Amino acid sequence: MSVQKKIHAQVTENPVVLYMKGTPAMPMCGFSAMVVEILKHMDVDDYLAINVLDDDEIRQGIKEYAQWPTIPQLYIDGEFIGGCDIVREMYESGELPELLKK
């Protein structure tokens, strides 16, 4: 299976997916830590977290898949939401909690 097909399967077969550096228990960058904290604050704990540091193909492939150069990347219901800044802004505006209620 190609890396693009693998990523597509991950984001479409799981309601919430976070590509991050590290794990939710031990984020390896501040941006990933912030997205984990936002999800935690909204009581979202049932999501697929993928540590891109464990797989160089995924780490590069996700940037191409979303056409977004940075990590973390959050997906909800197969849709790319954004990176840390966008997730934070959507959280603060109330838009992110609304997306997660669906």
Image: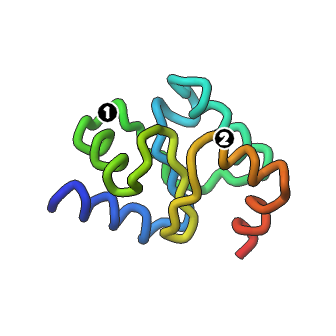
Q: Position of residue 14 (x, y in %)?
A: 48, 66
| Circle 2: residue type | Asp
Relative to 101, is 46 on the left or the right? Answer: left
Q: Residue shown at 55%/26% (left/top)?
A: 26
Relative to 56, is 39 on the left or the right? Answer: right
Q: Residue shown at 61%/56% (left/top)?
A: 46
Relative to 41, is 31 on the left or the right? Answer: left
Residue 16 falls in image quadrant: bottom right
| Vertical order, 42 against 6 (above or below) | above
| Vertical order, 40 against 7 (above or below) | above
Relative to 3, is 89 on the left or the right? Answer: right
Name the one closer to the observer, 27 or 64.
Answer: 64
Q: Which residue is mark 2?
A: 85
Q: Position of residue 25 (x, y in %)?
A: 58, 31
| Circle 1: residue type | Asp
* Secondary-structure class at tag 1: helix
Q: CA distance from mark 1 to mark 2?
A: 24 Å
| Vertical order, 76 against 69 (above or below) | below
Q: Which residue is mark 1?
A: 54
Outermost residue on the bottom side: it is: 102
Q: Residues within 10 Å of mark 1 (few under 14, many from 20)?
A: few
Residue 33 falls in image quadrant: top right
Q: Residue shown at 57%/52% (left/top)?
A: 82
Q: Position of residue 8 (x, y in %)?
A: 34, 65
